[in-house]
Amino acid sequence: MTPEDYIRLVEVHFPRLEIRAYESIEMGWDYFVLDVNDELIFRFPRRSNVIQQLEWEAEILPMLAEALPVEVPDFKYVVNRKSGEPSMFVGYPKIQGSGLDAQKLEESDARKPVARRIGEALSALHSISLDGMNDHPMSENPEPREAEGWRDVYRRLFQFAEEHVFPQLSHEARSREMQTWQEFLFDESNFDFSPVLVHQDLNTEHVIIDYESGTVAGIIDWGDCGIGDAALDFVGLAQGMGENFALEVLDNYQFADPGIMSRARFYEVVVPYHYVRFDHESGSDKFREQGIRAIETRST
């Protein structure tokens, strides 16, 4: 579908909405995104299996809105129909601002207050009770409520790597990657934590900053939110802003344990493996080569 096709869908389902301008935002594995009038964000699943993820997000957002000290999307426009592609899409008032950016943060002298607010938001998120919490609908297995179950998640990813990644690496890269995996899986301290509710995709694009006021305007894209290791929510911050910024956030985080950044470093290392697995499971060939190349060049 073209951006114009998506706009027509919005017009058909919301005829009273005046569309004066729009901008397509095509990044992301799961959604095509339209910014309408610089006031509304509409998200359209790229594949039918993402519908469950969007329904899950719609279910948990009201709870997150109550629990967190920052704004989250409020799905005011929801279409969920039995036929047509996409069969579901949503729209919400745009959280004004732009993504985390190191240079803009320094120029606005907002680094410390922003790090503090993110730390407070993660503290609130990770303190939400898991009692009665449903598993993410797209998880293959029940989400781990104990750390040993989390080890099983990464054992399965390691098995996938042995079958689909390691054979494509040079001998040197394969040896180093296997050592990295084994050191993580056999170190008991890496599983000395209690799983919590995590955003799980907290990259710089998903933390919206109002640089004029120097505040965190909101956190978006909660479709991957599920039960896991709190360290996951420091991975994207370290990747996009540098580890020093992630450590500043950690200084303002209530539940830090001694190994949290060590685990975050490992999760950062295995990000390319998720690229390869995504293509394998979706039948795509969009990210596999990128993932293999990232693993190979990191290890040699």
Image (cartoon, helix red, strand yellow):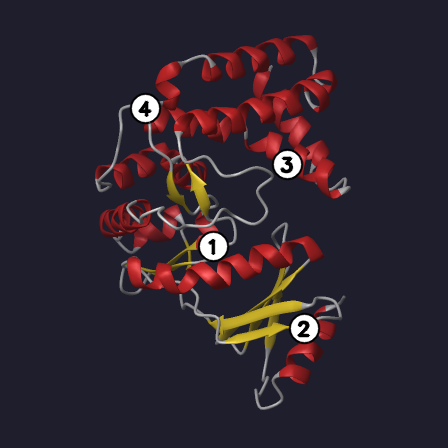
Sequence-first tag of 2 and 4: 2
User: If the image is split into quadrants, where does the C terminus sit?
Assistant: top right
The amino acid sitting under disc 3 is Tyr
Give SS at disc 3. Answer: helix
Q: Vertically, is 298 above or below 214?
A: above
Number of residues whose C-alpha sits closer than 10 Å to that of mark 4, classed few (under 14), some (14–19) or many (20 or more): some
Q: Confirm whether residue 190 shows in the render.
A: yes
The amino acid sitting under disc 1 is Trp
Q: Which quarter of the figure has residue 9? A: bottom right
Q: Residue 138 location in percent, x, y?
A: 59, 47
Please name which of the two marks, 1 or 3, marks the residue nearer to the observer.
Answer: 1
The residue that label 4 is drawn on is: 259
The residue that label 3 is drawn on is: 275
Disc 4 + disc 1, Cβ < 8 Å: no
Give SS at disc 1. Answer: loop
Q: Residue 100 location in percent, x, y?
A: 40, 51
The residue that label 1 is drawn on is: 222
Q: Residue 116 location in percent, x, y?
A: 23, 48
Outermost residue, front side = 132
Give SS at disc 2. Answer: loop
Residue at 58% in and 15% down: 177
The residue that label 2 is drawn on is: 81
Sequence-first tag of 3 and 2: 2
The amino acid sitting under disc 2 is Arg
- Is residue 159 toward the left or the right of residue 147 in the image? right
- Is residue 236 toward the left or the right of residue 272 in the image? left
